Image (cartoon, rainbow, N blue to C red):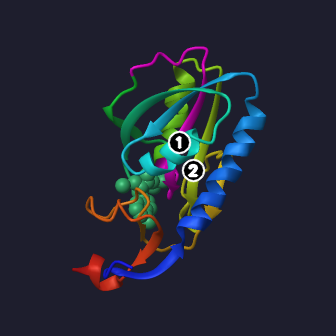
Amino acid sequence: MHNDIKEILLTKQEIDMMVHKIASSVNDDFRGEEVTAVVILKGSIMFAADLVRCLTVNVKLDFMQASSYGSGVESSGVINIKKDLETDVKGKNVLIIEDIVDSGRTLSLLREEIEKRGAKKVAIASLLSKPSRRVVDVKIEYIGTEIPDEFVVGYGLDMDEKYRQLDYIGILKPEVYMS
Ligand code: IMP
Ligand code: MG
């Protein structure tokens, strides 16, 4: 275990089981259809790579990097798109793949944006969710697991771009993010 990690929250095996479970729901829900997977950079790359390999429906991959602006308690906010899709999602089934839902601001704005572009159907898959942190109510079709209000890293998730390469999800030691 990495020295900066206090505790392993989800092992590689546990993550694997969650990914398979989500994939099997997606396969059922989109049977016979094509899905455009919109991978939200950078945190969800591991999850997306594992998830799409379990999909039996036809999948196209595209990438987006975005963050939300504004800290108001309302659902309104502005989305800052750092890298946009290459695909025109009009008329497409879109599966947004995200690592974690925290306040819900980013995903709620992203969902709105993709719907505005005329997608036929939008569904969100997030590996993790911190329900106690939610500020904006956003519909998430597929959730791997809910976690407590702790800052987690690994399996794509970072703190200052570090720890993404860990193959498990862990809780950082407090002294690491306090320093
Ligand atoms: P939201 O708009 O507040 O839901 O922000 C979600 C984004 O915050 C995620 O895509 C992550 O990039 C980041 N984030 C939230 N919680 C954590 C965490 O515990 N570890 C790492 N990144 C996190
Ligand atoms: Mg991040």
Please report the residue visible at 26 percent of the width from the left and 62 percent of the height from the top. 160
At 29% from the left and 76% from the top, the residue drawn is: 177
* Residue linked to disc 2: 126
Q: Quadrant of residue 92?
A: top right
Do the residues bearing badges 1 and 2 touch, measured as CB atoms within 8 Å? yes
Residue 74: in sight, yes or no?
A: no
Q: Which residues are magenta?
A: 86-105
Residue type at the position of mark 2: Ser
Ranked by sequence position, the earlier of labels 1 and 2 is 1
CA distance for labels 1 and 2: 6 Å
Q: Is residue 76 magenta?
A: no
Where does residue 43 sit, x and y in percent of width and height? 40, 51
Direction from residue 76 to residue 2 in the image, left or right: left
Judging by the rendered image, the residue that carries numbered circle 1 is: 97
- In terms of secondary structure, where does tag 1 sit? strand
Q: Is residue 172 visible?
A: yes
Look at label 1 and name its amino acid.
Ile
Q: Quadrant of residue 159?
A: bottom left
Does mark 2 have its CB less than 8 Å from ligand 1? no
Picture quadrant of ligand 1: bottom left
Q: Which mark is residue 63?
A: none
Left or right placement of residue 122 versus residue 157 in this view: right
